[in-house]
Image (cartoon, rainbow, N blue to C red):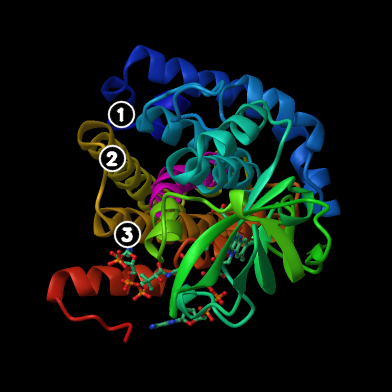
Amino acid sequence: MSRAAITDLYRIDDLLEPEERAARDMVAAFVDKEYLPIIGKHFRNGTFPMELIPRIAELGVFGATLKGYGCAGLNNITYGLILQELERGDSGLRSFASVQSSLCMFPIYTFGSDEQKDRWLPGMAKGKLIGCFGLTEPDFGSDPGGMRTRAKKDGDHYVLNGAKMWITNGNIADVAIVWAKVDDGGQESIRGFLVEKGMPGYRADEIKGKFSLRASHTAELSFQDVRVPAKNMLPNVQGLRGPLSCLNNARMGISFAVMGAAVACFEGAREYALSRVQFNKPIAGFQLTQEKLADMLQEIVKGQLLAWRLAKLKDEHGKVSPEQVSVCKRNNVKVALDIARVAHSIYGANGITDEYPPVRHMLNLESVYTYEGTHEVHTLILGKAITGIDAFS
Ligand code: TGC
Ligand code: FAD
């Protein structure tokens, strides 16, 4: 059996339209030729290959599902397939695309004014402008509704004070979508603000010492009396529904994407197991290794089908419910992490080096398990949908 025939055992390729396959294959070729040869160096150095951003833009990745403004207007299946290939390279590469597209361009497109869309979206589609999404705070991660960041109206400005933590691309972003509480006639309401690089009082400091997502920038944002023009507020959304709608979108992309990391680990481990000889035979010949490979493949097939169906539902119905998304994020990230851990074991001592991909993917997936709603948060979203009882409060 050929390599591709094994990994795509259920012929998911047959479910795809020719243009979906073509977009995926174009991104796959980019990852193979231009990204995989350099990821080891970037992961080691804790850097992101900024020079590749225009190339990624050329592939139509940024704001891929949006229409107009130089965006590709692709369907959700294609977007998922593209993210899967990026994540096969590294979660850091996929994360860059997810944040730019689902967490920054999407809210501007969906909730922004015409002026905001014209100003930011074309440059972001081209990768000339970079965005980030600031929801999490040092003391409020899973419970963003408790946020302390405040925006106070002062004439035709809002004055922003507070901090955001763990913000992907924060220190390289031209614009940050910052979610803050506004006093709305005695009642507090969450609103989104476009905070621009260089605004006095706004700082973005890179977080150092990460063992995960090393080839991705992560920052702490702080706002000290930052005067943000009122026209920079997203006019068409208020409440936690705003940021959570963006997350719905991004979580769907991640659910698809992590299967790329799983495939990289599975294919690498299979190849290694066939070539590594112990007790005079390839370790792939031992039944225990075969069980590991069988478990990996089985979960990849299931995870890919789940992701395909989720994206298809979105394409057919225009939206998916939070619990439909949670099933896929919860399952696929967990199985991808398990696959990376098992793949890592097949490499023995070699598995701990960055010469082989599993340990890098494993470390990355620990973050993916935590961000975009922790595994436990998705359990409770499902628990609430199943029982009608809210375990969060
Ligand atoms: P709750 O009372 O349930 O809801 C408040 C309002 O929001 C609406 N809503 C949603 N809307 C759209 N999509 C969803 N998934 C939604 N979930 C809830 C809800 O209908 C309600 O609307 P309204 O109009 O009635 O007010 O809110 P809660 O405070 O009980 O919280 C629920 C919970 C815990 C599920 C939510 O807070 C949550 O998801 N927490 C996790 C936070 C999170 O995921 N943060 C991620 C930050 S970004 C990130 O990690 C990027 S990583 C980089 C990368 O992507 O690569
Ligand atoms: P906490 O919420 O403190 O949770 C700690 C533990 O408690 C978890 O195991 C959690 O599941 C558990 N827990 C919490 N509440 C409950 C409960 N009710 N029941 C059971 N268990 C519970 N955020 C952004 O806004 N923008 C970004 O771009 C961004 N990028 C990120 C990049 C990286 C590399 C990382 C690691 C994080 C990023 N985040 C970002 C933040 C991420 O979304 C949060 O880390 C995540 O939401 C969890 O919040 P927390 O880390 O504060 O953990």
Which residue is the site of mark 3? 326
Identity of the amino acid at label 3?
Ser
Q: Please give the residue where the numbered disc 1 appears in the rendered image.
A: 12
Q: Which residues are magenta?
A: 248-268
90 in magenta: no
Secondary element under disc 2, as helix, strand or loop, is: helix
Closer to the camera: disc 2 or disc 3? 3
Q: Are marks 2 and 1 in contact (CB under 8 Å)?
A: yes
**Ligand 1 within 8 Å of the CB at mark 1:** no
How far apart are the alpha carbons under marks 2 and 3? 15 Å
| CB atoms of marks 2 and 3 within 8 Å | no
Left or right of 189, for residue 210 = right
Q: Earlier in the sequence, mark 3 or mark 1?
A: 1
Q: Position of residue 52 (x, y in %)?
A: 75, 30
| 292 with respect to 264 (left or right) | left
In this view, 4 is above or below 260? above
Q: Is residue 70 left or right of residue 10?
A: right
Mark 2 — residue?
Answer: 305
Badge 2 local density, few (<14 within 10 Å), some, or many (20+)?
A: some
Q: Residues within 10 Å of mark 3 (few under 14, many from 20)?
A: many
Q: Residue at x 39, y 74 (%)?
A: 376
Q: As shown in the figure, which amino acid type bears the numbered disc 1?
A: Ile
In the depicted view, which residue is nearer to us: 279 or 194?
A: 194
Query: Looking at mark 3, is its residue's CB closer than 8 Å to ligand 1?
Result: no
Vertical relation: 95 (above or below) 68: below
Q: Residue furthest front?
A: 155
- Find the distance from the CA under tag 3 to the CA under tag 1: 22 Å
List x then y, in percent, for residue 393.
31, 87
Mark 1 secondary-structure assignment = helix
